């Protein structure tokens, strides 16, 4: 088989374009802030455009919230908390969450398409992962709303108040669900700030709350950039802050909250090691590497961005990986055949390209696939580095793109030492035929989530979160309820 006939350029391997249509809904030209159950303009009248990273066209104008808007939103959340939500029985709260979950399912197609247009991720992922999991989080937490006594046996669980929640751009609606569902289930109200490059599904979530008849002010959404997030964190009316994003911003938030009684949970960066032993099912492991770092453009904080492969199978794994990577299709996020969509923003694209240069300057060897990429938009071909040293920046720092660093090891202890030699501790993976090795690795790696013979699998009942500079606090499962309750 020659190189040409394994590309996607109209050969017998090629697929005909299969784009998901976007004509079954209409985005508004502009979106206001969602405060007190209504969409309202920002006090300053300022707006910014949200861009489709696959074609660089503006999708809609978004209100840019300033300090006064933040204050309005926090006050709306406080009023809803005191007057309605904290007093409502868990059984009644649960009904709203079930309704929200069902409306997410009903509007799933629209939400998936908007997610892919606004964020650049392939429709296959938004349709099959993001949106169904978002609905699942609401179903799961709806079930907890009237059973908090069972989550914390022997204790009384009360809500803590108003939560300020700040989320990133890699899983926009899913992050809404991770943050909002447990907060609401436990009786808190919310002011959410989505990322400035992906605000649309969080705003559509505001519409969903209206449709579900959620009492006004229980969920509020303010849009804007980092300064809006910083104003939210500074607001004295918050009882709790939950943040997912970069480690640098996480640290800034921690500083800003120093000396206040506001509770904080942080889900920050990662640099996960995916460890492949010689006794692993190699073809499956290669698929796991692809899933771990290349799908969703590597825009995953728990991505398997470091590959540790046992020396005896290194060559085989690298060759198989190259062959598999050449089949990956980069392009239109709305096409159902697309494996890797657009990089979320120009800034992120430049950042990834910088790292590609840094890696080469440091002496590592770069492999990039030859797949065609569209002219307009932000794209990075799937890439990996070999001949890397532990001290290289591409091994130590989070790149947040489809770039893998490959290292080898000889013994299990060496694998663990390398895996743990990072400031992060969010996730990891192990591939082996031996159960005993799985347990040794899962016990030996300091990370919140470790997958065995699979990667990037999520379930609402399974807690997620990090160690070290990957943050603290858990989301999902019974553990994820804890940051949203006072126990007595
Ligand atoms: P990423 O590098 O993944 O874009 P960021 O940490 O920059 O992650 O952004 C995650 C979220 O944090 C976004 O919603 C962003 O607007 C917000 N944010 C950025 N800077 C600040 C800040 N200083 N205080 C609060 N939120 C911020």
Image (tube, helix red, strand yellow):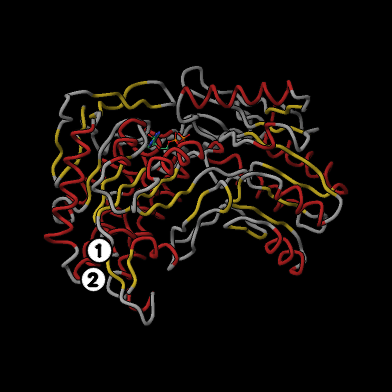
Q: For the residues marked 1 and 2, what is the alpha-carbon distance in whole angstroms?
A: 8 Å
Q: Quadrant of ligand 1?
A: top left
Residue in view at x 26 percent, y 51 percent: 190
Q: Nearer the viewer, residue 180 or 66?
A: 66
Quarter of the image holding residue 110?
top left
Residue in view at x 59 percent, y 37 percent: 398
| Residue 163 drawn at (x, y percent) | 29, 52
The residue to which callout 1 is attached is 187
Q: Is residue 267 above or below residue 46?
A: below
Instruction: Tell me if residue 213 can be seen.
Output: no
Residue in view at x 13 percent, y 42 percent: 38
- Residue 90 shows which numbered tag? 2
Query: Of discs 1 and 2, which sits in the foreground?
Result: 1
Residue in view at x 60 percent, y 23 percent: 353
Q: Nearer the viewer, residue 368 or 41?
A: 41
| Residue 391 drawn at (x, y percent) | 74, 35
Count how many numbered circles sit on residues in the image: 2
Q: Secondary structure at mark 2?
A: helix
Q: Earlier in the sequence, mark 1 or mark 2?
A: 2
Residue extending farthest to the front is 259
């Amino acid at each position: 088989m020659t190189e040409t006939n394994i590309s996607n350029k109209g050969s017998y391997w090629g697929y005909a374009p299969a784009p998901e249509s976007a004509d079954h809904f209409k985005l508004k030209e502009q979106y206001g802030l969602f405060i007190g159950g209504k969409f309202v303009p920002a006090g300053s009248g300022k707006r910014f455009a949200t861009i489709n990273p696959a074609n660089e066209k503006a999708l809609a104008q978004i209100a840019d919230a300033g300090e006064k808007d933040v204050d309005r939103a926090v006050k709306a959340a406080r009023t809803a908390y005191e007057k309605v939500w904290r007093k409502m029985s868990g059984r009644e709260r649960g009904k709203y969450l079930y309704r929200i979950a069902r409306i997410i399912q009903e509007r799933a197609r629209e939400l998936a398409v908007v997610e892919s247009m606004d964020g650049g991720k392939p429709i296959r992922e938004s349709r099959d992962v993001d949106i169904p999991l978002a609905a699942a989080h609401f179903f799961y937490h709806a079930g907890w709303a009237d059973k908090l006594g069972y989550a914390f046996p022997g204790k009384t669980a009360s809500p803590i108040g108003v939560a300020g929640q700040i989320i990133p751009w890699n899983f926009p609606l899913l992050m809404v669900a991770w943050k909002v569902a447990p907060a609401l289930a436990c009786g808190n109200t919310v002011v959410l700030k989505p990322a400035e490059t992906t605000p649309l599904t969080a705003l559509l979530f505001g519409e969903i709350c209206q449709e579900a008849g959620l009492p006004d002010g229980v969920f509020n959404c303010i849009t804007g950039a980092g300064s809006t997030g910083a104003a939210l964190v500074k607001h004295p009316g918050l009882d709790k802050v939950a943040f997912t994003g970069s480690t640098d911003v996480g640290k800034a938030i921690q500083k800003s909250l120093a000396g206040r009684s506001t509770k904080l949970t942080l889900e920050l960066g990662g640099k996960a090691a995916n460890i492949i032993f010689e006794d692993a099912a190699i073809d499956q492991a290669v698929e796991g590497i692809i899933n771990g770092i290349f799908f969703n453009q590597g825009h995953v904080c728990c991505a398997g961005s470091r590959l540790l492969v046992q020396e005896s199978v290194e060559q085989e794994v690298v060759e198989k990986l190259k062959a598999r990577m050449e089949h990956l299709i980069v392009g239109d996020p709305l096409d159902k055949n697309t494996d890797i969509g657009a990089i979320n923003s120009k800034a992120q694209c430049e950042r990834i390209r910088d790292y590609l240069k840094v890696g080469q300057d440091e002496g590592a060897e770069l492999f990039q696939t030859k797949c065609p990429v569209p002219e307009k938009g932000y794209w990075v071909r799937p890439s990996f580095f070999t001949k890397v040293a532990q001290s290289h920046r591409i091994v130590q720092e989070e790149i947040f793109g489809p770039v893998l660093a490959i290292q080898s090891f000889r013994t299990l202890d060496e694998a663990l030492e390398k895996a743990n030699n990072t400031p992060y501790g969010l996730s990891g993976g192990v591939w082996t035929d031996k159960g005993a090795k799985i347990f040794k690795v899962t016990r030996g790696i300091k990370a919140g989530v470790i997958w065995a013979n699979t990667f990037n699998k999520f379930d609402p009942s399974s807690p997620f979160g990090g160690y070290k500079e990957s943050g603290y606090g858990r989301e999902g499962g019974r553990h994820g309820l804890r940051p949203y309750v006072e126990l007595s």
